[in-house]
Image: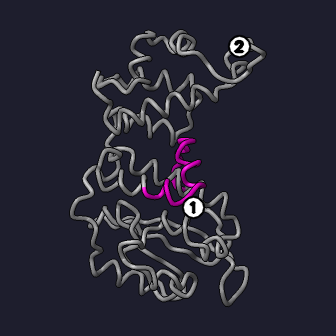
């Protein structure tokens, strides 16, 4: 059997990881082995979902098969996946259009997006490409995070600075939670492009550079973006609170604008 592709391999690894986390009593199943109360067998997932053992095994093996939406949704129900995780699995299975499947040609930011960032004035804002390269920012964001202008352009990736720049750890009052959420959002957004050589190289490099990223990547955490309150240790103003927003210009869907507005 040939080696599974990046997307299929990730689907299999993700299903295995979630299967091993299921609380058995949630499905009325007794402990197994030496009182193990967490984790389902493949046969149990098969029985509970109504999917054949062979078909489910092939999913976990990353075989090049085309499961139906009914199969994927049934497995997701048994594994207790949340909405973001369901979307992630559907994208990996080829059932939902992945976000920005083709990132080629979207690494540069249109000039009018920079104009919008600048117009936000005292509200820190920046723009990301599909692979989370920070392609533009305004003066308020540079005041919040001065290193953004000092880092070489090829290293100026949001996920990378979150996990490797000590200044970011000092800036983020809740670094463990924020870094975990960012990793989950990144994984969810790039699901359909996991076989892309540039993306694969980036992930492998970050795994080598950051033990925290390596551990988080192995957990297969997935999450969707939600506007929320963010707390920063501002280098000049001390503790400041913002509301975190995400926007995508309709004429530049490959660009993600992140803006912080003061908490009222």
Residue 132 picture quarter: bottom left
Q: Is residue 137 above or below residue 203?
A: below
Find out whether residue 108 is within the magenta segment.
no
* Residue located at (64% from left, 70% from top): 169
Q: Position of residue 48 (x, y in %)?
A: 56, 13
Q: Position of residue 49 (x, y in %)?
A: 51, 15
* Residue located at (53% from left, 41% from top): 220
**Circle 1 — which element?**
loop
Drawn side of residue 105 relative to residue 89, left or right = left
Q: Position of residue 172 (x, y in %)?
A: 65, 71
Of residues 54 and 166, the one nearer the viewer is 166
Find out whether residue 219 is within the magenta segment.
yes
Drawn side of residue 77 relative to residue 104, left or right = right
Q: Which dot marks residue 40?
A: none
Q: Which dot marks residue 227?
A: 1
**Magenta-drawn segment:** 205-225
The crowding category of the residue bearing disc 2, from other C-alpha atoms within 10 Å (few below 14, some 14 to 19, many at least 20), is: few
Which secondary structure type mostly characterizes the magenta part of the structure?
helix
Q: Earlier in the sequence, mark 1 or mark 2?
A: 2
Q: Which marked residue is nearer to the observer: mark 1 or mark 2?
A: 2
Count of numbered marks: 2
Disc 1 + disc 2, Cβ < 8 Å: no
Drawn side of residue 23 relative to residue 195, left or right = right
**Circle 2 — which element?**
loop
* Residue located at (35% from left, 38% from top): 7
Which residue in the structure is indicated by mark 2?
A: 28
Q: Is residue 198 above or below residue 155?
A: above
Drawn side of residue 83 relative to residue 87, left or right = right
Of residues 167 and 46, the one nearer the viewer is 167
């Amino acid at each position: 059997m040939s080696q599974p592709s990046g997307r299929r391999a990730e689907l299999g690894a993700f299903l295995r990881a979630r299967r091993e986390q299921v609380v058995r009593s949630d499905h009325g199943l007794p402990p197994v082995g030496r009182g193990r109360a967490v984790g389902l067998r493949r046969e149990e997932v098969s029985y509970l979902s109504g999917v054949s053992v062979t078909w489910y095994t092939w999913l976990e093996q990353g075989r090049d098969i085309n499961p139906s939406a009914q199969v994927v949704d049934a497995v997701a129900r048994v594994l207790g996946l949340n909405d973001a995780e369901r979307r992630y699995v559907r994208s990996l299975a080829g059932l939902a259009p992945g976000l920005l499947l083709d990132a080629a040609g979207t690494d540069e930011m249109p000039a009018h997006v920079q104009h919008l960032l600048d117009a936000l004035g005292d509200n820190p804002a920046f723009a990301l490409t599909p692979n989370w390269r920070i392609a533009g920012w305004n003066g308020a964001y540079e005041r919040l995070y001065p290193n953004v202008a000092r880092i070489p352009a090829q290293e100026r990736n949001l996920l990378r600075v979150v996990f490797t720049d000590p200044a970011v750890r000092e800036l983020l009052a809740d670094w463990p939670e924020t870094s975990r959420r960012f990793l989950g959002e990144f994984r969810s957004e790039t699901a359909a492009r996991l076989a892309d050589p540039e993306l694969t190289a980036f992930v492998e490099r970050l795994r080598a550079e950051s033990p925290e990223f390596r551990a988080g990547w192995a957990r297969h955490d997935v999450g969707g973006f939600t506007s929320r309150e963010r707390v920063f240790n501002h280098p000049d103003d001390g503790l400041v609170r913002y509301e975190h927003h995400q926007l995508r210009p309709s004429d530049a869907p490959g660009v993600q604008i992140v803006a912080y507005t003061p908490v009222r």
